[in-house]
Image (cartoon, rainbow, N blue to C red):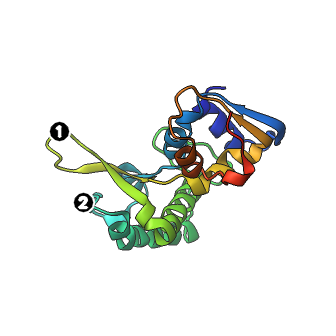
């Protein structure tokens, strides 16, 4: 697997069981790949699709920090939970056809919003805000991403748990001590060759 595909496969399939040995090549890319895998996104389209702001079109506010987004996200989440509780559209087994959205898509959005809110409540200072604007004039945000600065707390759960022992290979790790710290490895539990 390439790195991004492997992390996704490990974490999104029930069939992948931990191995005796997990070999990770290009280990210097662990932080970048975990950051990309873990980022939390919400778009104006998702909010508009479910009318989570009533009848007005979604305008994602502009804030500097993830914590500043918390009240707005909690309002969106409350509206999404209310929609979920009162849902009377196509059943869970229906599929998405054209612009028709199904209950499972609403459930996914609620889970995503709960995850984003939970992460910000606990780790808000570790998340950077990455807005995607409509154009270079930065008039309106169409999608907002929250990305972890420090992935060390995620590395075991998202990667290292899939091997009883893990071999990390890279020709470009310059500072061994800083690297293991950045990916959550305890110095006493590893050997550098």
**Mark 1 packing: few (<14 Cα in 10 Å), some, or many (20+)?**
few
Report how many numbered discs are placed on residues in the image.
Answer: 2
Quarter assignment of residue 3: top right
**Mark 2 packing: few (<14 Cα in 10 Å), some, or many (20+)?**
few
On the image, the x and y values in percent for residue 53 come to 34, 66
User: Mark 2 or mark 1, which is nearer the start of the sequence?
Assistant: 2
Task: Name the residue: 52% across, 57% down.
Answer: 109
Residue at the extreme left of the image, as rendered = 137
Q: Is residue 40 visible?
A: yes
On the image, the x and y values in percent for residue 130 come to 34, 50
Judge from the rendering whether residue 103 lies leftward or rightward of residue 190; answer left or right.
left
Task: Name the residue: 56% across, 25% down.
Answer: 171
Task: Name the residue: 60% across, 47% down.
Answer: 180
Tell me the CA gap for discs 1 and 2: 15 Å
Dot 1 lies on which element? loop
Task: Name the residue: 17% across, 39% down.
Answer: 136
Residue 136 numbered mark, or none: 1
Query: Which residue is tagged 2?
Result: 62
Judge from the rendering whether residue 37 lies leftward or rightward of residue 55; answer left or right.
right
Q: Nearer the viewer, residue 75 or 175?
A: 175
Q: Is residue 103 visible?
A: no
Q: Is residue 61 above or below residue 158?
A: below
On the image, the x and y values in percent for residue 169 come to 65, 30
Residue at the extreme front of the image, as rendered = 193
Quadrant location of the N terminus in the rendered image: top right
Judge from the rendering whether residue 141 lies leftward or rightward of residue 77; answer left or right.
left
């Amino acid at each position: 697997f390439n790195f991004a595909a492997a992390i996704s496969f490990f974490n999104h399939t029930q069939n992948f069981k931990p191995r005796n040995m997990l070999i990770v090549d290009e280990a210097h890319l662990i932080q970048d790949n975990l950051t990309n895998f873990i980022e939390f996104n919400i778009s104006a389209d998702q909010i508009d699709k479910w009318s989570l702001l009533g009848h007005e079109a979604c305008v994602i506010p502009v804030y500097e920090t993830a914590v500043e987004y918390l009240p707005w996200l909690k309002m969106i989440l409350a509206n999404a939970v209310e929609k979920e509780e009162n849902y009377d559209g196509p059943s869970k087994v229906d599929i998405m056809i054209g612009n028709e959205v199904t209950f499972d898509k609403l459930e996914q959005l609620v889970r995503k919003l709960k995850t984003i809110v939970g992460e910000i409540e606990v780790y808000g200072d570790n998340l950077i805000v990455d807005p995607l604007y409509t154009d270079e004039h930065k008039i309106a945000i169409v999608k907002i991403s929250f990305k972890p600065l420090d992935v060390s707390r995620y590395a075991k759960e998202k990667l290292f748990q899939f091997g009883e022992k893990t071999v990390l290979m890279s020709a470009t790790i310059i500072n061994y001590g800083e690297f293991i710290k950045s990916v959550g490895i305890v110095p006493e539990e590893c050997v550098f060759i």
